[in-house]
């Protein structure tokens, strides 16, 4: 009996809630999805009160001005404006890349000015749009990497309240015909970083492009992600948070939960439903319902992580 | 003296004329970037042709040869990138932002 309990503990029964406007709560226990309840936002937030939570924003694409959203600054502002109204103040924020559209200094400036309104520490990783300056990422490193004491093209780790966070870069030095790529140097660094950590340490790994193959035809995956998954296999609780695809996707594989966040700028089509990826124009009144942010809650004790996606508008 | 001058003029003309006409006549060929692909994905040109990539997508793309020798800036919507292929050979390239997008330029003498 005692053994059963510890094995469940080790597996770290993972609850994963996707709140998609309709208030449907999905609970994933041991990787098996169950619709356990229909909850309102209040209940989801009450659950958040027992541990610490952090916020994920992604793909703000400041500088984009095409039809899918001529003013991504306003929608970013709307997303950041909601942070103050959250029942539980997030401990910090992560930004999973594509802060800017073309790595221009004024795009980074504008994004930072608005994001600062949340009054939270922000941990960034770059998207492919953030490293197209002449120095191929030099500006990103100066602005965001340095304060994180990031290495290489911008990877780093930090700890918060017993949870180990790892920010990875899978958008630099990409190879012809490939998808996202981490590269040997980064994987060697990660091997070293995780080596002496207890398997009971909850891990949160975040990077721009999904670390599992969502759709290879559109390059929505990371070529050498399997090496990362091999490194984290022994850990009891692993949460992988990505952006890039501008829509919510989720997968659970053993103790690893993969989750992608919405963009605050524009949506993209579901895999294979259009001739190509790219900005998708929806009716103006629908835009708020396809943009949003993600709140992740770490509960003490059993340490399940709850992931709640919230649209800008229901 | 006059003969000398004429000869010099003739020489200069002989050298300059082909250069000038070549500049005027330089062939151009266009590769369209749309729906996250290069069209045509393989382009055959004569040496000296200027290849112009034109981005019709709502997302930036770039042109990077696999040998790393050509590396365009990120091309925003409607931006173009021109490169003169002077030397015959096969040039494989991809998009630096979306590397699953591939193309090839075959340059013949």
Image: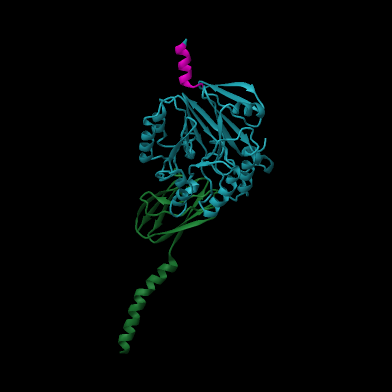
Residue A5 in the magenta stretch? The answer is: yes
Q: Residue at x 36, y 34 (%)?
A: A192
Q: Quadrant of residue A193?
A: top left
> So how many labels did they put on this image?
0
Quadrant of the drawing holding the C terminus of chain A:
top right
Residue extending furthest right?
Answer: A285
Q: A187 or B11, which is in the foreground?
A: A187
**Horizontal arrangement in the rendering, residue A265 relative to residue B2 (left or right):** right
Which x, y percent locates residue A230? Answer: 39, 29
Lateral position of residue A16 relative to residue A140, left or right: right
* Image location of residue A176, percent across then percent down: 40, 44
For the magenta stretch, what is the residue range?
A: A2-13
Q: Is residue B39 visible?
A: no
Visual hue assigned to chain B: green
**Residue A236 percent across, percent down from the top left:** 45, 24
Above or below residue B87? Residue A115 is above
From the image, state the color of chain A. cyan
Above or below for A254 versus A117: above
């Amino acid at each position: 009996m005692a053994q059963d309990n510890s094995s469940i503990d080790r597996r770290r029964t993972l609850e994963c809630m996707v709140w998609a406007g309709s208030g449907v709560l999905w609970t994933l226990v041991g990787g098996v999805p169950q619709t356990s309840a229909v909850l309102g936002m209040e209940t989801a937030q009450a659950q958040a009160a027992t541990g610490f939570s952090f916020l994920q924003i992604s793909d703000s694409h400041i500088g984009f001005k095409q039809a899918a959203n001529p003013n991504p600054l306003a929608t970013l502002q709307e997303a950041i404006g909601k942070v103050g109204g959250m029942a539980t103040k997030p401990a910090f924020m992560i930004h999973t890349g594509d802060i800017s559209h073309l790595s221009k200094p004024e795009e980074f400036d504008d994004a930072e000015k608005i994001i600062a309104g949340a009054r939270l520490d922000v941990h960034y990783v770059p998207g492919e749009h953030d490293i197209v300056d002449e120095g191929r990422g030099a500006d990103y490193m100066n602005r965001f990497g340095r304060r994180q004491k990031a290495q290489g093209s911008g990877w780093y780790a930090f700890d918060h309240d017993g949870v180990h966070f790892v920010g990875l870069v899978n958008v630099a030095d990409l190879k012809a015909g490939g998808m996202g790529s981490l590269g040997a140097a980064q994987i060697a660094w990660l091997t070293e970083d995780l080596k002496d950590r207890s398997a009971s340490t909850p891990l949160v790994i975040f990077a721009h492009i999904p670390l599992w193959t969502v759709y290879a035809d559109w390059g929505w995956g990371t070529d050498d992600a399997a090496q990362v998954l091999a490194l984290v296999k022994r850990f009891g609780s692993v949460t992988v948070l990505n952006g890039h695809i501008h829509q919510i996707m989720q997968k659970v594989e053993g103790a690893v939960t993969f989750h992608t966040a919405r963009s605050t700028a524009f949506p993209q089509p579901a895999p294979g439903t259009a001739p190509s990826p790219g900005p998708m124009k929806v009716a103006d009144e629908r835009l708020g319902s396809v943009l949003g942010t993600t709140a992740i809650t770490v509960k003490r004790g059993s340490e399940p992580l709850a992931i709640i996606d919230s649209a800008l508008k229901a | 003296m006059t003969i000398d001058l004429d000869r010099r003029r003739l020489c200069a003309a002989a050298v300059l004329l082909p250069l000038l006409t070549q500049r005027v006549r330089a062939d151009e060929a266009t590769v369209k970037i749309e729906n996250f692909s290069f069209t045509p994905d393989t382009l055959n040109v004569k040496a000296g042709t200027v290849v112009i990539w034109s981005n019709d997508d709502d997302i930036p793309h770039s042109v990077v040869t696999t040998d790393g020798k050509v590396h365009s800036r990120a091309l925003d919507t409607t931006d173009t990138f021109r490169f003169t292929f002077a030397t015959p050979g096969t040039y494989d390239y991809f998009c630096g932002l979306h590397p699953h997008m591939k193309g090839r330029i075959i340059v013949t003498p």
